[in-house]
Amino acid sequence: PWVTVAIAATCVVLFALGKYWAGGADSQALARMGANSGVLVKHGQVWRLLASAFLHANLEHLIVNMLALGGFGPMLERLLRPGRYVLLYGLSALGGGLASAFLGGGAMSVGASGAIWGLMAAGVGLSIRPRGLLPSHRLSQARRRAVVPLVINVLYSFMPGIDLFADFGGGFVGIVLVLTGVITRG
């Protein structure tokens, strides 16, 4: 799954660069690198909507998101093929960034969770409408495997410091792309 590996590598390299450039001022470095901010996006810095999806606040944040990416990414990359997988990931990241910027409370936001929520929700969507991508004998297992992480992540998204708007915005885009067939058409 070379696309998943490339996304993870980009996140790790940007995290290391952010630490190197921060000099103890992590939030300032993240702001300069592209942390999402509704105020700045509304003033034309729209690049932050995607850039923020490759930045992480701390090592724990990075590890949790990369483990989730490793859990959802390779399967979806194989099923959808690289081009559609990149589209799913990128549009989910954008949906999460837009929701965070325009619905969130105004705090700076970073992390791949909007894109990862898009992957997770796409997995749920595929278990509902497989469109020939999943064999019928695997559907019940796929549904069970999709529901547990979804429930856990919904609950986790309401924890303090978690950008639930990015999560739900990315998830919304991911499931809509699958259920409408936009990302799964042959």
Image: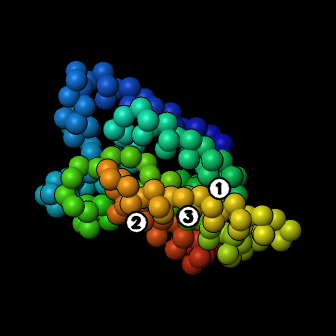
Rendering quarter of residue 166: bottom left
**Secondary structure type for disc 2:** helix
Q: Which mark is residue 169?
A: 2
Rendering coords of residue 79 (x, y %): 70, 58
Rendering quarter of residue 114: bottom left
Number of residues whose C-alpha sits closer than 10 Å to that of mark 2, classed few (under 14), some (14–19) or many (20 or more): many
Task: Mark 1 vs mark 3: give the one in front.
Answer: 3
Residues under labels 2 and 1: Cα distance?
19 Å
Give the residue at the far bottom of this rendering.
Answer: 180
Number of residues whose C-alpha sits closer than 10 Å to that of mark 1, classed few (under 14), some (14–19) or many (20 or more): many
In the displayed structure, 146 sits above or below 57; it is below
Query: Residue 37 vs residue 14: left or right?
Result: left
**Secondary structure type for disc 1:** helix
Rendering quarter of residue 1: top right
Q: Which residue in the protein does label 1 denote?
A: 76
Q: Are marks 3 and 2 in contact (CB under 8 Å)?
A: no
Q: Which residue in the protein does label 3 denote?
A: 151
Lower position in the chain sequence, tag 2 or tag 1:
1
**Front residue of this view, candidates 114 and 140:** 140
Residue located 22% across and 36% down the image: 27
Residues under labels 1 and 3: Cα distance?
20 Å
Rendering coords of residue 95 (x, y %): 39, 64
**Front residue of this view, candidates 92 and 47:** 92
Task: Mark 2 vs mark 1: give the one in front.
Answer: 2
Residue located 32% across and 50% down the image: 161
Q: Which mark is residue 160?
A: none
Residue located 42% across and 65% down the image: 168
In the displayed structure, 139 sits above or below 70; it is below
Query: Residue 10 vs residue 143: left or right?
Result: left
